[in-house]
């Protein structure tokens, strides 16, 4: 009887681990790629449950700091993950960089605009330019740094339309609500039927994506397994399909 009870309790515990539900908070630019990864992950681990929460990296950090339930965090820059680590939000031993991207200036597909250099944005043809809020959106920080280096940031302020995340910038471009905007290369590729790339933007730091397990997770085993899957050949193949590069 004791052996049977032990066996039953072991089976029940195993089922609980297999059926663990986790929340993955990921940068807005990862939405489609992570949906693809989660679909594949479920095929390999059909009993697992993953809730994907996407927003600007800064907003996701604030959610975690304020106690929102999260098991895995994936940001669009190292700076935000550094802040998460400093504030005790993540387990630093699980932190890994899993993907690289690039910043571009994009315009509506039917636009007649073209540009050879960033200073072209000063021209009268560029009336409205979408940029993610640098305070909480990595794409906005990368754009601001590039424009500051070129001596253009202050002069372009009257033209800049600030967005809450890079996908909002992409939507504004696709709908023709702005003349151009700063988005990631992967975003432009995702909506190539509605937007076109005008120029690649050199960045001072690599556009890298870190991932880590939350310190407050109650499902550490499942969270670590998901992180490992993102880093695995299968996860990297999905990221590659969406235009991300290996670090």
Image: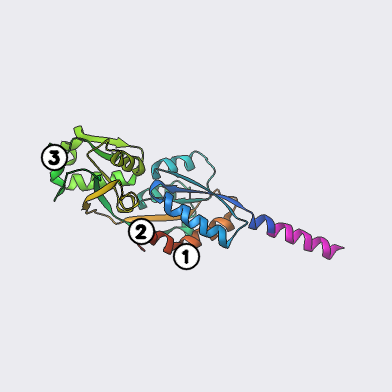
Disc 3 versus disc 1: distance between alpha carbons?
A: 44 Å
Numbered tag placed on residue 122 in the rendering? 3
Label 3's element?
helix
* Residue contact at pointers 1 and 2, CB within 8 angstroms: no
Asked if residue 165 lies left or right of residue 152, the reply is right
Q: Nearer the viewer, residue 229 or 238?
A: 238
Residue 228 x %, y %:
50, 62
* Residue contact at pointers 3 and 1, CB within 8 angstroms: no
Quadrant (top left/top right/bottom left/bottom right) for the C terminus: bottom left
Residue farthest along the top direction in this orientation: 158
Numbered tag placed on residue 244 in the rendering? 2
Q: Residue at x 38, y 57 (%)?
A: 242
Numbered tag placed on residue 234 in the rendering? 1
Q: Is residue 10 magenta?
A: yes
Rendered view: 242 above or below 135 = below
Classify residue 222 by image quadrant: bottom right
Q: Is residue 128 magenta?
A: no
**Mark with earlier residue (3, 1):** 3
State which region is magenta.
1-14
Classify residue 127 by image quadrant: top left
């Amino acid at each position: 009887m004791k052996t049977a009870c032990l066996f039953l309790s072991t089976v029940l515990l195993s089922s609980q681990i297999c059926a663990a539900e986790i929340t993955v908070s990921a940068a807005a630019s990862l939405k489609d790629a992570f949906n693809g990864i989660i679909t594949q992950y479920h095929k390999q681990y059909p009993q697992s449950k993953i809730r994907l929460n996407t927003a600007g990296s800064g907003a996701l950090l604030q959610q975690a700091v304020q106690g929102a339930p999260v098991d895995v965090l994936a940001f669009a820059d190292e700076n935000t993950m550094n802040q998460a680590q400093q504030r005790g939000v993540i387990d630093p031993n699980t932190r890994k960089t899993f993907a690289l991207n690039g910043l571009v200036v994009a315009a509506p597909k039917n636009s007649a605009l073209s540009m050879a250099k960033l200073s072209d944005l000063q021209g009268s043809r560029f009336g409205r330019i979408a940029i993610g809020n640098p305070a909480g959106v990595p794409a906005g920080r990368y754009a601001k740094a590039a424009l500051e280096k070129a001596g253009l940031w202050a002069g372009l302020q009257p033209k800049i339309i600030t967005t809450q995340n890079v996908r909002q910038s992409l939507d504004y471009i696709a709908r023709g609500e702005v003349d151009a905007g700063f988005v990631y290369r992967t975003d432009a590729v995702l909506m190539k039927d509605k937007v076109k790339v005008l120029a690649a933007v050199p960045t001072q730091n690599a556009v890298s994506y870190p991932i880590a397990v939350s310190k407050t997770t109650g499902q550490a085993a499942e969270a670590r397994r998901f992180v490992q899957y993102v880093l695995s050949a299968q996860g990297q193949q999905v990221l590659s399909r969406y235009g991300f590069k290996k670090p």
